[in-house]
Image (tube, rainbow, N blue to C red):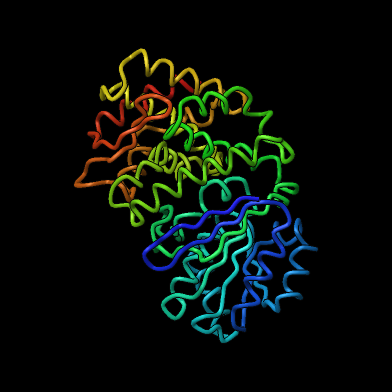
């Protein structure tokens, strides 16, 4: 069992990590007024049916189930959730429990931030990706106008229950995505930790792996420290976007080929090439980073990436220029200098385009 508390401007976030989180969740809900609402999706509702039934009955929760997948993170479903909150009579101090992966957390978090200008949010992340990254920090969003996470708020959860039992029913295709965010945390903080993660990525990605919980705790500490120091991403917290500007473009133009965490791994490889081109990393260091990332991608069965090679640089650049991190026409990127250290740097568009062109040779 592991706990930490983030001290944040609006309210603190208490995070609990362990197995059998039901008593933690029930004890917290017992202190909160009715009505209470649970938001989940079809896939989680099937996979965790018994746990959800016990939670709904034991804590007197009204349940709303949405379709599974990134496509659900839209304005229509946001309005559906808000309408349900209204018909239920959710009060200012009534909690919304978002029980699912990153989509449910993002959408539920946005609804919680908007209803009566903010109701308590409780997150129960069910995917490795959500456990590693999305559950902490208060970022909420929906996709809008073809742009990923274009409409959102900062609204941190008051409680996050990282129940490792949820990983026992995690679909196989979800594991590699979680590894992408784990490795990102290591590449931002500790090169030796990154090396250990890279030794056997496929082997690590098992629910019962003895080291998985320890890696999760470490990644959560990395994120917590950056969020506490820069809650609204005015500076250093932006380092958590390592690989993300490239990744979001791949997700936007990849036609569902990649999940978010997988796209982050490809994005880190593109960022390493941008580091070479800008001089943020000398050639020898860039060679090492690129080779290490290629080995990880191959180990996870993501190389060669023939479909991604066919994406046009022009389309990828168009997606990137619509990113939230663009400043006066220049892209603000997180550039790895070496595994364990990265920096923020504005990069000219022509340099980014060249990084994409050369990246294609790396993933063939």
Q: Which residue lies furthest to the right in this view?
A: 50
| Nearer to me, 224 or 249 | 224
| Nearer to me, 352 or 188 | 188
Q: In which quarter of the image is residue 346?
A: top left
Q: Provide residue 62's location: percent of width, then percent of height.
A: 67, 77
Q: Is residue 181 rendered to the left or right of residue 312? A: right
Q: Residue furthest top?
A: 284
Residue at 49%, 71% in the rendered image? 112
Residue at 58%, 54% in the rendered image? 3
Q: Provide residue 307's location: percent of width, then percent of height.
A: 53, 31
**Where is 10 relative to 18, above or below?**
below
| Nearer to me, 37 or 23 | 23
**Where is 237 relative to 344, above or below?**
below
- How many numbered discs? 0
Residue at 62%, 54% in the rendered image? 162
Q: Which residue lies furthest to the left in this view?
A: 328
| Nearer to me, 137 or 27 | 27
Q: Is residue 30 rendered to the left or right of residue 85? A: right
Q: Provide residue 240's location: percent of width, then percent of height.
A: 41, 43
Q: Provide residue 326's location: percent of width, then percent of height.
A: 27, 46
Residue at 37%, 17% in the rendered image? 285
Q: In which quarter of the image is residue 95?
A: bottom right
């Amino acid at each position: 069992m592991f706990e930490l508390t983030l001290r944040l401007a609006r309210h603190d976030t208490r995070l609990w990590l362990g197995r059998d989180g039901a008593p933690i969740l029930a004890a917290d809900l017992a202190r909160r007024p009715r009505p209470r609402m649970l938001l989940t999706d079809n896939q989680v509702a099937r996979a965790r049916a018994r746990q959800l039934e016990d939670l709904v009955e034991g804590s007197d929760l009204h349940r709303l189930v949405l379709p599974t997948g990134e496509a659900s993170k839209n304005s229509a479903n946001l309005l559906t959730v808000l309408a349900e909150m209204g018909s239920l009579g959710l009060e200012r101090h009534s909690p919304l429990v978002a029980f699912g992966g990153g989509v449910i957390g993002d959408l539920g978090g946005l609804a919680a931030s908007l209803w009566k200008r903010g109701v308590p949010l409780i997150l129960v992340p069910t995917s490795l990706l959500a456990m590693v990254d999305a559950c902490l920090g208060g970022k909420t969003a929906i996709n809008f106008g073809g742009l990923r996470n274009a409409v959102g708020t900062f609204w941190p959860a008051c409680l996050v229950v990282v129940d490792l039992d949820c990983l026992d029913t995690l679909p196989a295709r979800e594991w590699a995505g979680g590894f992408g965010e784990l490795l990102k945390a290591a590449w931002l903080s500790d090169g030796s930790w990154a090396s250990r993660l890279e030794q056997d990525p496929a082997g690590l990605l098992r629910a019962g792996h003895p080291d998985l919980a320890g890696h999760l705790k470490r990644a959560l500490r990395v994120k917590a420290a950056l969020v506490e120091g820069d809650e609204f991403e005015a500076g250093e917290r932006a380092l958590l976007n390592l690989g993300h500007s490239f990744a979001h473009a791949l997700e936007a133009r990849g036609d569902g080929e990649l999940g978010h965490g997988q796209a982050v791994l490809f994005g880190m490889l593109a960022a390493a090439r941008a580091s070479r081109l800008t001089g943020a990393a000398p050639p020898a260091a860039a060679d090492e980073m690129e080779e290490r990332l290629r080995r990880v991608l191959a180990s996870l069965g993501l190389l060669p990436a023939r479909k991604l090679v066919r994406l046009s640089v022009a389309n990828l650049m168009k997606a990137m220029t619509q990113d939230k991190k663009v400043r006066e026409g220049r892209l603000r990127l997180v550039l790895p200098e070496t595994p364990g250290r990265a920096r923020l740097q504005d990069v000219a568009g022509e340099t980014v385009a060249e990084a994409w062109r050369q990246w294609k040779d790396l993933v063939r």
